[in-house]
Structure formats: structure tokens, C-alpha cells
Image (cartoon, grey):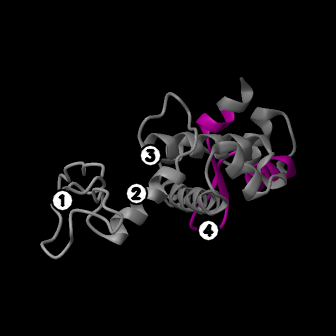
Amino acid sequence: MPTKTAALGICDHCGAAFPPDVSPYTAGGDPRRYCSDSCQYKARRKLVGTRPHDETATTSHERKSVRMMVLYRLRIEGHLSGLADAELGEALGVDRTTIWKDKEALKAADKLYNKVMARAPWDDRLTIHEAATALNCSEDTIRAMVRDGILRGAKIYNGRWRIPKGEVERLQR
């Protein structure tokens, strides 16, 4: 009969000691690795949910930042509306609900940006007409660019649009 491997009595997932009512061995005689079913479930989910990520991003926060930059860039280039969340998720190594949450975070960031821009100094903002003149295009084109997310702008208290000078300079380059 084979000898048993000594059980450590410490959970592989959370690192806690096993409760006194939990046997250090499974029914099959193998050493128990997890202190509870929930720890075993979480450890397996973590293992199964592991997908390849950007090699430069090591933490989940950095990976989310990379995803947000990719989504923002796709939105600016006008490609975001043509892609399904599942396709984006597969390309970025996450599920579609994560992409949906990231898109909602982008919307929330835009709202916050608009609030901040409404209080920005007047010297740093241009009217639609001034931006159109600087970019040598029509006012309707500027409005469409703001609506599509190519150009960032904010409505001020009276409902008129203001465009940051930095955004116009970015498009002039």
C-alpha cells in the first residue's frame, strides 16, 4: 500500500490554516489543498480565466489601462462602432462583459471631462467657429467630429460647444 504524502494543513489559495472540522486528507486519501469549496472554486476560476495579456502590462490595473487606451484609440479612429464586444474581448483577451464595462467607463470619463471643461479657463477653449477656421473645415464637420469622438469638446452652461486648443492643435499636426 502506498504511503500518504504529508498534508500541510494550509490552503493553497488563501494561505489560511484549515478549520479544525476539515480533514487534512480527501476521501481518496490525497492531501487536501484548499480549506473550503469556495477557495477551490476561486483557485480553479483563476487558473481557467488566465489568458494571454500584453507582456508589458503586469498588473490588472495596467492591463485595464492598455485596454482603455486601445478602446479610446479605436473610438477616435472611428472603428469602435463597427466591432462587436465579443470580437473586441477575444482580441484583447477578456470576455465581452469586461469590454462593455470598459465602454461604460469611457462614457463616464467623457461626462467627467465635459464637467471639467465647462469650468476650464476661457483662454484655453475655442468656439465651433474658431475651431472650424483653424482646421479649415465647416462648423458642421467640427460638430460631427465632436459627436463621433474624434475631437473632444464640451457644452458649457448656455449649451454652446467649446473645444480645447490642444485638441485643435493635435489635429493640425
Q: Amino acid at mark 3?
A: Ser
The single residue placed furthest to the bottom in the displayed view is 21
Name the residue beneath numbered marker 2.
43
Q: Position of residue 106 (x, y in %)?
A: 59, 56
Q: 4 and 91: which one is in front? A: 4
The kind of secondary structure element at disc 2 is helix
Q: Residue at x 76, y 47 (%)?
A: 129
Which of the two discs, 4 and 2, sits closer to the camera? 2
> Residue 130: in sight, yes or no?
no
Name the residue beneath numbered marker 3.
60
Which of the two discs, 3 and 1, sits closer to the camera? 1
Q: Amino acid at mark 4?
A: Asn
Residue 163 shown left or right of residue 42 in the figure: right
Sequence-first disc among 4 and 1: 1
Which of the two discs, 4 and 1, sits closer to the camera? 1
Q: Residue at x 72, y 31 (%)?
A: 171
Residue 111 occupies which quadrant of the picture? bottom right
Q: Which mark is residue 16?
A: 1
Question: What is the distance, in whole Å, between disc 3 and disc 4 at their CAs?
Answer: 41 Å
